[in-house]
Image (spheres, rainbow, N blue to C red):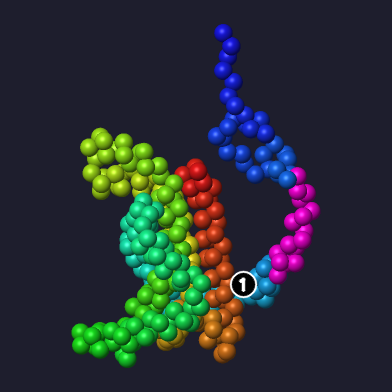
């Protein structure tokens, strides 16, 4: 009796199996040489040289001195607290929203996707002005907020709202991809077994998409941590109250370059760590498949 042989593709791999880039030692389906990447060398140097220059011109002694400075610690503390609070709010509110967007393909949801993409392309200064026009003293809801004894602009809450505004799309888009990759068949099978919707989400959907959700949260946190334009217009640049690390870098550039260098190196280090985390999550079985 003849044995069964699976169908194979042009690379000799079983059909349905993913082929990793460069697998088999080939240059790719088009046979492109690696020298083609040299065309982008000027761009690589443009990205790399300024970062190396920042590190080279910031001695370790400078870092150790300013890491104990009260202004530096205040900016770091405020940045971490507000960005983590904003990211937590985005994850809690954005996860069910992302799930609904990928599971229900309606005209309204497609319009919502456009709205959620808008902060990515909108200049941050415009975002800050829009927030001020909505929640400022003379804004659309200013009188109502004043009647309740609430003031949002130029407070730590304004910092959080600005960070949520610019960071939310990064989480929702990444979360949507991760949640959409969870096959509906698994959810339907759990439903046939009598599981409730909440149990299906908690025990099937969200665990399978967990690495993608974490990756989206990391990207959202990175964007919130580096937010500048919307924050300075909506929250101001008040030391110890609304001055985050990017705002302290801007102020330090005018009055204390060493402080600006120190905070810039710290932000660079955090950014690298976040990117490494995202790459690890994306390359894992649950994140990359």
In this rendering, does residue 199 appear at all?
yes
235 relative to 168, above or below? below
- Residue 114 in magenta? no
- Residue 39 in magenta? yes
Residue at 24 percent across and 40 percent down: it is 195
Residue at 37 percent across and 42 percent down: it is 184
Q: In which quarter of the image is residue 100?
A: bottom left
Which residue in the structure is indicated by mark 1? Answer: 60
Residue at 46 percent across and 63 percent down: it is 170
Label 1 CA crowd tier, 10 Å (few <14, some 14–19, many 20+)? few
Residue at 32 percent across and 83 percent down: it is 135
Q: In which quarter of the image is residue 264?
A: bottom right
Q: Range of the magenta residues?
A: 31-46
In this rendering, does residue 80 appear at all?
no
111 horizontally vs 36: left or right: left
Quarter the N terminus occupies: top right
208 relative to 217, above or below? above
Q: Which of 113 and 201 is in front in this view?
A: 113
Predominant SS of the magenta segment: helix
Residue 152 rendering spot, x and y as whole percentages? 32, 83
Residue 191 rendering spot, x and y as whole percentages? 27, 39
Q: Which residue lies furthest to the left in this view?
A: 148
Residue 3 rendering spot, x and y as whole percentages? 58, 14
Residue 183 rendering spot, x and y as whole percentages? 40, 42
């Amino acid at each position: 009796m003849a044995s069964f042989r699976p169908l194979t593709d042009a690379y000799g791999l079983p059909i349905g199996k993913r082929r990793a880039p460069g697998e088999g030692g080939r240059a790719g389906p088009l046979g492109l040489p690696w020298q083609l990447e040299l065309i982008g060398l000027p761009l690589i140097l443009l990205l790399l040289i300024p970062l190396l220059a920042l590190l080279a011109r910031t001695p370790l002694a400078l870092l150790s001195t300013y890491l104990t400075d009260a202004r530096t610690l205040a900016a770091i503390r405020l940045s971490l607290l507000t960005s983590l609070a904003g990211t937590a709010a985005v994850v809690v509110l954005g996860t069910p929203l992302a799930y609904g967007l990928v599971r229900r393909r309606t005209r309204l949801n497609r319009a919502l996707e456009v709205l959620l993409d808008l902060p990515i392309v909108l200049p941050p200064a415009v975002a800050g002005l829009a927030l001020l026009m909505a929640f400022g003293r003379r804004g659309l809801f200013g009188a109502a907020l004043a009647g309740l004894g609430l003031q949002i602009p130029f407070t730590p809450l304004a910092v959080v709202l600005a960070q949520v505004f610019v960071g939310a799309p990064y989480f929702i888009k990444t979360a949507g991809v991760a949640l959409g990759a969870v096959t509906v068949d698994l959810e339907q099978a759990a439903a046939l077994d009598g599981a409730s919707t909440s149990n299906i989400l908690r025990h099937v959907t969200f665990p399978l998409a967990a690495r993608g959700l974490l990756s989206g949260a990391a990207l959202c946190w990175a964007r919130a941590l580096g937010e500048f334009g919307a924050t300075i217009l909506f929250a101001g640049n008040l030391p110890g109250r609304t001055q985050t690390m990017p705002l302290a870098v801007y102020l330090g550039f005018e009055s204390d370059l060493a402080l600006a260098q120190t905070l810039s190196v710290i932000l660079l280090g955090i950014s690298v760590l976040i990117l490494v985390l995202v790459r690890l999550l994306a390359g894992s079985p649950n994140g990359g498949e």
